Image (tube, coloured by chain):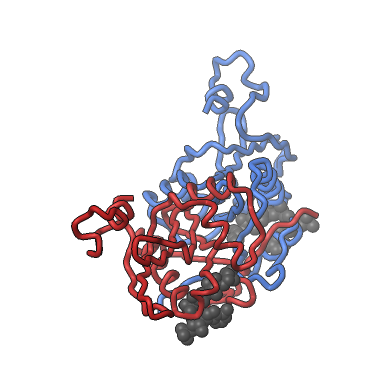
Chain colours: A red, B blue
């Protein structure tokens, strides 16, 4: 919170300086001539409408915001990615993980805005999550991958069905 | 807690009566002539040494108790199964689930003591968990199944790799 307040306060003496915050900073080449900066954050107070817009952009089904809010607050790790131009910021990526805070974590809801895909941002975001989870001494990082993103995760070091362990989902009979 | 206190207090006027508690009750035919009663519980204050003994019995690798304690307290649902004979109780089954408390839950560490396997207890325990998770409005119940238990979960309504969604585990390069 301190981070955004400082970065977007025009009276701040050093608003162009990179301030400290609880996330991490990644600088990427902007696709347009107007250079933009891209930030990760682990703050949880994300505007739910902005998150919905991001999920809409990749065609995901809408979910009740009340439940999304609950899911964010009970996730172990929430990572968002922001494009910052001048004093405007825009949510361009998101992912979260549930966990028992000890052994296992499961990554859910990984998304990069279509305009920002295929620039290595999804990769950096997942690498960042892995680092955070390893820092918390979580040894078993898991996820359920849609068929079209299996290769994306494989390149990041995720193994499919290791030792024959299979993902299963319960459906009512 | 109230449940066990009442059940094991010999001064309690009605100690043989089935008291109310936050779990559920299952009565099964005991394998020996000495009839025993089997209970589910959702209380989290499980003796960690007793749990370790149960996991030892199925050959699982030991884990630091400090981390096990943390995992129990950060799991969304912890289910234990107890055999009650006279005023003694014994831990004979266990399972837990992590969750975002909104959409997804993942079941971990499912175990029934070898002496009590193949009597339908594992099945009742998972059915009980599903009921509890559905009651909490969790729609997506997931797990990672070892090859030898895939059929056990399939009979319970779990589907393998639905729509090609695959379980993946991260391993360091
Ligand atoms: C999947 C997604 C997060 C990837 O993010 P991204 O920023 O586009 O990916 P990156 O640019 O970081 O790609 C990293 C690497 O994975 C590869 N890759 C990216 N998307 C891929 C895909 N769908 N399938 C296979 N490989 C893929 C890239 O070619 C790149 O390879 P390289 O390291 O050899 O250069 C993003 O495309 C997305 O949000 N998709 C829609 C939502 C979605 O499907 N989420 C996953 C649900 S389980
Ligand atoms: C797997 C386990 C929890 C099953 O519990 P259980 O009490 O023995 O199982 P149940 O008696 O309730 O069996 C329910 C059904 O599954 C079947 N079943 C049980 N174990 C099975 C197995 N390993 N493979 C295939 N089917 C199995 C039973 O035949 C029964 O079928 P039915 O409904 O047609 O009668 C138990 O055997 C166990 O703790 N195993 C060791 C630990 C382990 O491997 N845990 C899973 C790690 S992912």
Is B59 situated above or below B163? above
| Drawn side of residue B141 relative to residue B8, left or right | right
Q: Position of residue B54 (x, y in %)?
A: 52, 50
Is A66 situated above or below A104? above
Q: Which residue lies at the image location 65% right of the left edge and 42% below the top edge?
A: B132
| Drawn side of residue A121 relative to residue B90, left or right | left
Quadrant for residue B166, please give it: bottom right
Q: Quadrant of the C terminus of chain A?
A: bottom right
Question: Outermost residue, left direction?
Answer: A13
Q: Position of residue B99 (x, y in %)?
A: 55, 51
Q: Position of residue A160 (x, y in %)?
A: 57, 76
For the question of whether residue B168 can be seen, the reply is no
Q: Which residue lies at the image location 61% right of the left edge and 13% below the top edge?
A: B13
Is B144 situated above or below B93? below
Is A134 situated above or below A2? below
| Drawn side of residue B28 relative to residue B133, left or right | right
Q: Which residue lies at the image location 48% right of the left edge and 55% below the top edge?
A: A99
Q: Which residue lies at the image location 48% right of the left edge and 40% below the top edge?
A: B46
- Between B111 and A157, the one lying in front of the other is A157
Q: Position of residue B77 (x, y in %)?
A: 56, 44
């Amino acid at each position: 919170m301190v981070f955004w307040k400082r970065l977007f306060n025009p009276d701040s003496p050093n608003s162009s300086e990179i301030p400290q915050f609880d996330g991490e900073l990644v600088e990427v080449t902007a696709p347009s001539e107007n250079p933009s900066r891209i930030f990760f954050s682990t703050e949880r107070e994300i505007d739910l409408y902005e998150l919905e817009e991001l999920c809409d952009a990749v065609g995901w089904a809408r979910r009740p915001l009340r439940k999304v809010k609950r899911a964010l607050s009970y996730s172990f790790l929430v990572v968002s990615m922001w494009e910052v131009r001048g004093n405007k910021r825009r949510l361009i990526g998101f992912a979260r993980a549930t966990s028992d805070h000890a052994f296992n974590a499961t990554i859910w809801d990984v998304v990069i805005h279509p305009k920002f895909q295929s620039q290595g941002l999804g990769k950096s975001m997942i690498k960042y999550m892995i680092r955070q989870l390893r820092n918390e001494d979580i040894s078993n990082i898991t996820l359920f991958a849609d068929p079209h993103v299996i290769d994306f995760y494989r390149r990041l070091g995720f193994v499919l069905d290791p030792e024959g362990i299979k993902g299963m989902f319960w459906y009512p009979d």
